[in-house]
Amino acid sequence: MAKKKDSSKSAPAFKHEAYIEGSGSIVDQQIADVLKSNYMPYAMSVIISRALPEIDGFKPSHRKLLYMMYKRGLLNPDKERSKSANVVGETMKLNPHGDQAIYETMVRMTRGNEALLHPYVDSKGNFGKQYSSKMHYAASRYTEVKLEKICNELFRDIDHDTVDFVPNYDNTMQEPSLLPATFPTVLVNSNTGIAVSMASNVCPFNLAEICETTIALMKNPEHDIISTLKGPDFPGGGFLLYDEAELNKVYETGRGSIKVRCKYSYDKSSNCIEVTQIPYTTTVEAIIDKIIELVKAGKIREISYIRDETDINGLKIAIDLKRGTDPDKLMQKLYRLTPLQDSYPCNFNILIAGTPKVMGVREILTEWTAFREECVQRRTYFDLQKKKEKLHLLEALSKILLDIDKAIKIIRETEAEADVVPNLMIGFGIDEIQAEYVAEIKLRNINRQYILRRVEEVDQLRADIAEMEDILSDKKKIRKIIIDELKEVSKTYGIPRKTLFFYQSDIEEEEVIDDTPDYPVNLFVSESGYFKKITPQSLRMSGEQKLKEGDYIKQTFEATNKTELIFFSDKAQVYKSKASAFDDCKASLMGDYIPAKLSFDDGEELRTMIPTTDYSGHIIFFFENGKAAKIPMKSYETKTNRKKLANAYSDKSPLVAAIFVAEEADILLRTTSGHALVFNTGMILPKATRDSQGVQVINLRKNAALSSAEIITEEAAPELEKYRARAVPAAGKPAKELGDSNQLSFE
C-alpha cells in the first residue's frame, strides 16, 4: 500500500530581494502634469502612427499589410491567391493589433469591397460592399487575396534603397517607413482617419487627371489646377456639383464641402425610378430608411413602394411611383430631403515628416514631388554604386585577359589556398576585391571567349555611370524621369471618370409646398402647463374640460392647424412648435404636458404661450421692478427651423406677465402696495434686443413690487379712467376699491 504524502511539510518559502522604487509611496502631482505625461504620448502615437495618412498615401496599417503581401510574393502574376487568414497572420509580425483589425484594413483595400478607385488587393470571395452597411464580409478563412498589378508602382524601387527601413515592434524584422510610389497615391484613393483632436478626410481623384496635374505643376508651379483636375472622382460614381469656387477652395486650402448626388433612370413601363449610383458618404440602407420615414410622416406622398434590388450585377434601389407622379420633380424633392444628395467634407490633413498638416492639392503635389525626387535620387545613387562595383570587377578581368595562362600558373603554383588572392594581387596589380572575384571564376569560364564577352560590358557601364552622375547633378533630369514615369502610369492604369458633373443650372428651384392640412382649431393652455388642440366640432360635442386637481385653463385661442406656437418658459427661454405637431385632442383628455413634449430643461416651467401666423405685433414683458420691455414678435422669427431660443426676455428681475398686443392697447398695472396705473402701450418704444431690461413704467413705493398686468377691455375702460397716466413712468394711484389684484380680471 502506498504511503500517504505528508501534507504537513510545506515547500520552503521563496526568498527574494526584489525592490520596486517608490512602491507604496504617495506622490502629490498637479492633475495637468499627470494628464500631460500620461495622455500626450498616447495622443501623439495615434496621430503619428495610426490615424493619419503620410505622403505616400498610406496609414501604417495599410503599409504593413501591403509590404507583407509583397514579401510573400503575392505581386508575382504567376503566384496563386493566398488565403486571407495566412496574410493576416503574417502581417501580425509587423502590426501589433488583433487579426480582426488587420482583416478589416485588408477588406477596404480589396476590389470586391469597391471602396477604392484603384484597389490594391485582388480578391476572391465575399468582401462586402462599401455602399451597404448590412452586406458583411466573409471570415478570413474563406476569402483569398493577392496584390493588384498597380502595386508594381508601389514596390518597383523598394529594394534600391529609395526609402528608409525601420525595425518592427519586436525588433525582429525591418519594414519600410514609406512606400516609394511612382504616382501620388495620396490623392488617387480616399483616406479617412480620426485622431486625437484632429481628423483627416481625403477624397479620391482620377488617376490620369492627377498625373497630368502633377506634371503641369512640375513644369509650372503657378499652373491653374482646375484646368486639368476637374474634380474628385468617387468609386461609386454619381454626379458632382461643379462649383468652381468651392473646388478652388479645396485645391488651395484642403478644406471644403463637395456635393454629390445619385444617378438614376426612369422606367416608364413599370412607373419606377431605378437608382444605380449613390453618394460615397451614404449607404443603401440609410437612403431607404430615410425615404420610409418621410413617407410615414406624410412629407412624401408620391411613392407607393421602395425596395433594395442590389445583386451580383451591382447596386440598385427601385422606387415605385404612384400614378401621375413626375419622376424628375420627385427626385428634386428626394435630393433635398434624403441622402440621395449628400456632401463630402474635405479635410486634407496629412503627415509630413511626422507633423500633421492641412494642405491643398497644390501643396500636397509639391510635397509628393519633393518626396519622389528624393526616391529617384536615392535609386540612382544606389544603381550608380552597383555599376561602379561591377565596373571595378570587370576591369580586373581586362587585366587577366592579357595573360590568362599567367593567372592559371599563379593559382596552380600557390601551395596554400589563403595565398591565392595575395598572389593574384601581386601578379596583376589588382586589389583584394578584384582578386577575390577572379579567384572565384569557375574553371569552365577561364577562356578567352567568356572573358571577352564580359569585358565588352565595360564601355556600356562607363557610359551608364557617366549618365547617372549627370542625373544626380541635374535636378531637371530627375524631374524628367518622374514625368516619364507619371506618363507611363497614366497610360497603363488610367481609367475614365466614374463621377460625372452636374451644374447649378441643372438644379430646379423647387417651391417648397407646405402640405400640412389646415383647419380651424381651439387651443387651450392650463396653469400647470398642459396643452390641448381641439377641433370646433369636437368642442361642441364635449362636456367640461378634464384637468388635474387644482388646475385651470388660463389661455384660450381660436387658430388653425398651421399656426406657429411660441412657448415662453420661466427660465427666459422660448420653445417653438406648430399646432400641427400636436395631435387633435378631446376635452375629456388631459392633453400634452408642454415641458415634457418640448423637452424643457430640468425644473423649467411654462409661463405663457403666444400663437402667430406672421409674427406681427409686439409682446410686452412686465417685471417686478416696474419696468416693461416691448419686443417685436419678429425678434422670435428664425430662417432656420430652430426649436429653442435663449435670452427670450430679460432675467434681471422676475417676470410678472407677458402680454401680446396686435396693436396698441391700454394696460392696467397693480402693485403690492395697493396702487394702480393705466397707460397705453404706445407710450413705450420697441426694443431691438429680446433680453432688453425695458423702461420704467410705474414708480414703486419702498419694498413694493409690480404684482399684475392686464389688458383693459372697452367695457372696463371708463371705470378705470381715473388711474390713467399721461406719461410714463408714473407713480400710480391708491386703488383699494379694486380689491385683490390677483382676483381681478377684465377679460
Image (cartoon, rainbow, N blue to C red):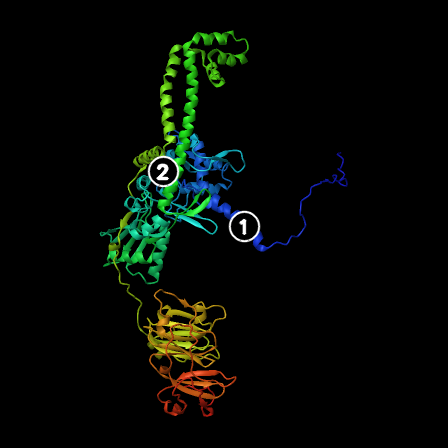
Disc 1 residue crowd, few under 14, some 14–19, many 20+, Cα 10 Å: few
Q: Compared to 600, does 98 lie above or below?
A: above
**Nearer the observer, 506 or 42:** 42
Residue 139: x and y in percent read 44, 41
Q: Give the residue pinned by disc 2.
A: 183
Give the residue type at disc 1. Tyr
Q: Is residue 742 left or right of residue 324?
A: right
Give the residue type at disc 2. Phe
Q: Compared to 141, does 535 lie above or below?
A: below
Quadrant location, the N terminus: top right
In whole angstroms, how far apart are the C-alphas of marks 1 and 2? 37 Å
Instruction: Specify the label residue 39 is tagged with.
Output: 1
Instruction: Specify the label residue 444 is tagged with.
Output: none
Q: Compared to 459, does 179 lie above or below?
A: below
Kindly tell me whether residue 381 is visible in this rendering.
yes
**Nearer the observer, 584 or 515:** 515
